[in-house]
Image: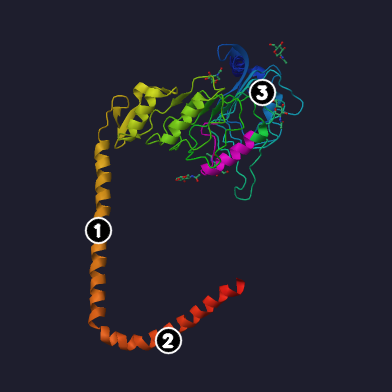
Amino acid sequence: MWALRYLSAVIFLLAPFPIVNGGDCGDKFLNKCSCGMGEYIDRMQYIVNCTNTGFRDTNMLQDLPKQTEVLIWTGNYVPELPWNVFGTLNTLDNLTIIDMSNNHIHEIRGKSYHHVPNVKRLILNHNNLSISRDDEDVNHHHPRVFSNFVNLMELHLTNAFSDNSSAQLSEDLHDIFVNSNLTKLTKLHLEQNEIRMFKDRRVFCDLPSLRDLHLGDNLLKEINFNILCLNHLRFLDLERNKFTQMKLKDLNVLDILANSQGHETELIVDLTYNQLACDCTINNMQDWLKKTKVKIRNLDNLFCYKQGRPYQPMLSVKYDKCQVQRRNADSSKGHTVTIVFLSVVLLTIILTLVITAIYINRNRIKKIVNPVMTNVSRKVHYTTIKDDDAPEQYV
Ligand SMILES: *[C@@H]1O[C@H](CO)[C@@H](O)[C@H](O)[C@H]1NC(C)=O
Ligand SMILES: *[C@@H]1O[C@H](CO)[C@@H](O)[C@H](O)[C@H]1NC(C)=O
Ligand SMILES: *[C@@H]1O[C@H](CO)[C@@H](O)[C@H](O)[C@H]1NC(C)=O
Ligand SMILES: *[C@@H]1O[C@H](CO)[C@@H](O)[C@H](O)[C@H]1NC(C)=O
Ligand SMILES: *[C@@H]1O[C@H](CO)[C@@H](O)[C@H](O)[C@H]1NC(C)=O
């Protein structure tokens, strides 16, 4: 009796908590999420917040409240996103932001996202996506994967891919960009994806509205992708990559873009924490900085590096050492000259020896060669006659 009363008291005390924690999301959310108005990006919005909820399927997302504006669904385990994650009946007209980071997502099917006409920001950071055509025996390539996001403006794919094959990644990405028709996309985040190079140089060329391209924390050594097709580009983030110098061609291409007609906005490039070498190549960049329209972000904090450590601020380095390099170049030219000279001398000596030998043995050689020579001269004679005859027939 006493125990029962105690128990009911406990239940009475605990009962309100699930409600406070957002029990209003509905049964399927297992009281793990909170639903309600909250501040998100400086605005009160209806937020469904499932942070670190450890779900192993997406079933509850079919019952998202219709008024949902922001969906945060992170820290779950769903290697494969099924078709119609949000159900077939629900049209979430007010949904503008989806954050599905950190869910171990390996595959997103072409038909996973439906009824998301007004989503402007899609965040898929820290997943394990495979989008390749020929991955083992499974085809993970669904080129229309984002095609229902007709109003998408921001796509966040930081540390999103499992693929190591970054060169292939660029082809697959390009295909997705083409087929998903992301005409309004202005921001693309691709940081931390171990990208060494883009095999498909036109990878971003089908994103006509792209303004901010974030490629920080990758392994790029040069700008080996087409940026001239990005007429609205205003920010190119290349922080913490593997640039050891800015090649002249890269500096040129940045200038061409910044100066091109129709490119109205200022072009800003971030190169911080690249290990730009403290050597003559700095001079190219310094010269370029004096005349370019392009703005280098954090220029005051841009250092050149020696032995993997920041050595001197880029702007204050003076490199006269280039003279030394030039002198090295000269001396290597010197070596070549010496080698050619010695070869000539050697050849002359050998020739002299051969000629001398022939001269000394001229009588013996004559005996051997003479019969042959007579033969040859006879032949020459006949041929000459024949040749002389020939033209006459045509005259
Ligand atoms: C979502 O919930 C997590 C923890 O439950 C909290 O840290 C985070 O601030 C919430 N986000 C928003 C936008 O309310
Ligand atoms: C969507 O937002 C509009 C404007 O805030 C509101 O009038 C409408 O009721 C919302 N739709 C739903 C399904 O809640
Ligand atoms: C990523 O996907 C691959 C292939 O399915 C799997 O072997 C690997 O364990 C996954 N990694 C993580 C962190 O989920
Ligand atoms: C990715 O490449 C690195 C080195 O290039 C290697 O150590 C790592 O095992 C690779 N990871 C996968 C998942 O293939
Ligand atoms: C792409 O979207 C634009 C408008 O956003 C539309 O006019 C065009 O027809 C679409 N193209 C394809 C192939 O779906």
In the image, 387 versus 188, the foreground residue is 387
Give the number of the mark in front: 3 or 2. Answer: 2
The N terminus sits in image quarter = top right
- In the image, residue 135 sits, relative to residue 352, either above or below, namely above
> Which color scheme is applied?
rainbow
Residue 24 image-quadrant placement: top right
Residue found 51% across the figure and 23% down from its top: 234
Distance between mark 1 and mark 3 Cα atoms: 72 Å
Residue found 69% across the figure and 19% down from its top: 65
Identity of the amino acid at label 1?
Phe
Q: Which residue is mark 1?
A: 341
Residue 69: x %, y % from top left: 65, 18
Distance between mark 2 and mark 1 Cα atoms: 42 Å
Q: Could you tell which of marks 3 and 2 lies nearer the N-terminus? A: 3
Query: Any mark on residue 385, and which?
Result: none
Q: Residues within 10 Å of mark 3 (few under 14, many from 20)?
A: some
Query: Any mark on residue 151, and which?
Result: 3
Is label 2 in a helix, a strand or a loop?
Answer: helix
Q: Contact (CB < 8 A) between labels 1 and 3?
A: no
Q: Contact (CB < 8 A) between labels 2 and 1?
A: no
Residue 34 image-quadrant placement: top right
Q: Which quadrant contains ligand 2? A: top right
**158 sits left or right of 354 in the view:** right
Give the number of the mark in front: 2 or 1. Answer: 2
* Magenta span of residues: 157-177
**362 sits left or right of 224 in the view:** left
Query: Any mark on residue 375, and which?
Result: 2
